[in-house]
Image (spheres, rainbow, N blue to C red):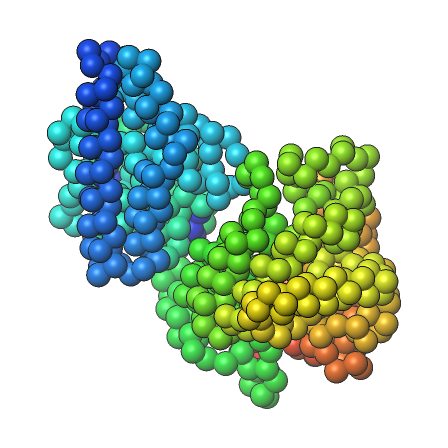
Amino acid sequence: MEKYSGKSVMKGIAIGRVHLYKKLEYQVTEERAADPAAERERFLAAVERAKEQLTKLYDDAMTNVGEDHAAIFDVHKMLLEDEDYLDTAAGEIENGYNAVYAADYAGTQFSEMFAAMDDEYMRGRAADFKDISRRVIRILLDMPEEEIHSEEPVVLVAEDLTPSETVKLDKKKILGFVTVKGSASSHTAILARSMNLPALVNVDIPLADELHGKPCVVDGFEGEFLVEPEEEILSEKVVRKNQWIADLEALEKLKGQDNVTKSGKRIDIFANIGNVEDAEAACAADAGGIGLFRSEFLYLGRDTFPSEEEQYVSYRAVLEKMNGKKVVIRTLDIGADKKVDYFGLEPEENPALGYRAIRICLDREEIFITQLRALYRASAHGKLAIMFPMIISVEEVERIKQIVELVKTELAEEGKPVGEPELGIMIETPAAALISDELAKEVDFFSIGTNDLTQYTLAVDRQNQKLEGICDIHHEALLRLIEMTVKNAHKEGIWVGICGELGADTELTEWFLKIGVDELSVAASAVLRVRGAVRALP
Ligand code: PEP
Ligand code: MG
């Protein structure tokens, strides 16, 4: 038996045979072209042909797997129109290289640039640039399109899987995924989650031909990939797998059910998301809405501020996907551990206690106003609620509301339609919890950010692994602050949710209901589990 470990991007157990997926190989060498002008034409013709293929792939995917998976082909078409990408390739052709080398060079450059970005989502896009270049190169070399063949359900093992490969997979034949590369937001991971199949990325396994057809186990709970497992271990994994399937079946039955206890007490269960794609998982998990969209992810992993238009498109996409369900979008929470070079933030002694979140927004209003304009414009397309992070005073909320009024007036003068989003704040500092009676008079809702509330209440840095032992997430001080916040919210007739990790802690579900929490916002994969916990209560 050989055992490898990797990063689990989807829990579960797959037992089957390895299907080693290898791309059709080609060699790219630094070949020179005799006639650069003709070579440039050849390159551009291949790009055009690639775009035609992508249009067809888009249409096929729309029919077979739906818009969510088809959209990537549109993105690829756009990338093939990217002037920087085309100029980079054209530059190499002008330098005398042939079109294959130029396409490979541009693909590698852009892929490396994206792979070096901080934002996990952006890193995941590195594969897209490789994918478009491979497509152009295959056309230039007159190679057939890549396909995945397999007769029986298999565990797909690959170096990496590009979006166009994943979408072509015959879903009924896949038991799980193992890739040497990839990230949590790579398409392999996204697909695995949407298919609810176990998947590991970053598995350091040599992709030797002998691997193909060998029996194997993917354990997404332990992050293990076992090749030719021993009898005894295989039996253990079979037991674990059956348990997993039974758990999933039980959870599936909870879809469409209410989050209600046996005695009729109910609570909303929403999902936390970091990007537009996550909203898909939230819908699939039957979340009642989005309780926290961490909008700062739109700002990470890039070199410039996202424009109002870019933000508007993303917010609107989430609202439309949620189809009338409530979506709480938090304004940007940059700073502390979320660093962005183009903000030009100074290094700080204590960044968690520093210049972050609403403090930046109220200091650099132009950034805040751009985001608020995008949010208000998006609010015309669904049930939006806007939430402000890291609040410590009533004055901050008053200032926020003044700026909001300015934005609304501006948009009205421009004739832009807006909705009537609720305005709420995060309660994630002890200060906010302690004055929640005052704050409740100012806003439409509270959402308790227990991640930060814990670190500030216990003076325990949430990033410091050494402190895990003393970080009591059920500390009486924290529970008192939560209870106080809920009481103060209700006294003013506003709703209150929990969007920190503690919301998914089923040891506390009964207590949350008892003190009257109105909403729990948890990871999409935890929605049904928490629903189950609620329904099991007396
Ligand atoms: C929190 O602090 O609990 C929270 C939800 O926000 P974040 O984890 O993004 O700081
Ligand atoms: Mg927080």
Residue 536's spot in the image, x, y percent? 54, 77
| 141, above or below 413, in the image | above
Question: Of residues 266 and 93, which is closer to you in this image?
Answer: 93
Q: Quadrant of the N terminus?
A: top left
Residue visible at 63% across and 69% down in the picture: 412
Where's residue 379, x and y in %? 56, 69
For the point 45% across and 72% down, the residue is 323
Residue 366 versus residue 106 in the image, above or below:
below
Does the rendering let one see residue 137? Answer: yes
Q: Tell me what residue is drawn at x 69 percent, y 77 percent.
A: 495
Q: Residue 336 vs residue 381: left or right?
A: right
Residue 423: image x %, image y %? 69, 70
Q: Residue at x 82, y 66 (%)?
A: 398
Between 312 and 507, which is closer to the camera in this rendering?
312
Observer-nearest residue: 51 or 160?
51
To which quarter of the image does residue 244 belong?
A: bottom left
Instruction: Return the residue found at the far bottom.
Output: 263
Res. 241 in view:
no
Q: Is residue 507 above or below residue 264?
A: above
Label count reads 0
**Which quarter of the rendering shows the C terminus?**
bottom right
Q: In the depicted view, which residue is nearer to us: 375 or 333?
A: 375
**Vertical placement of 432 versus 190: above or below?**
below
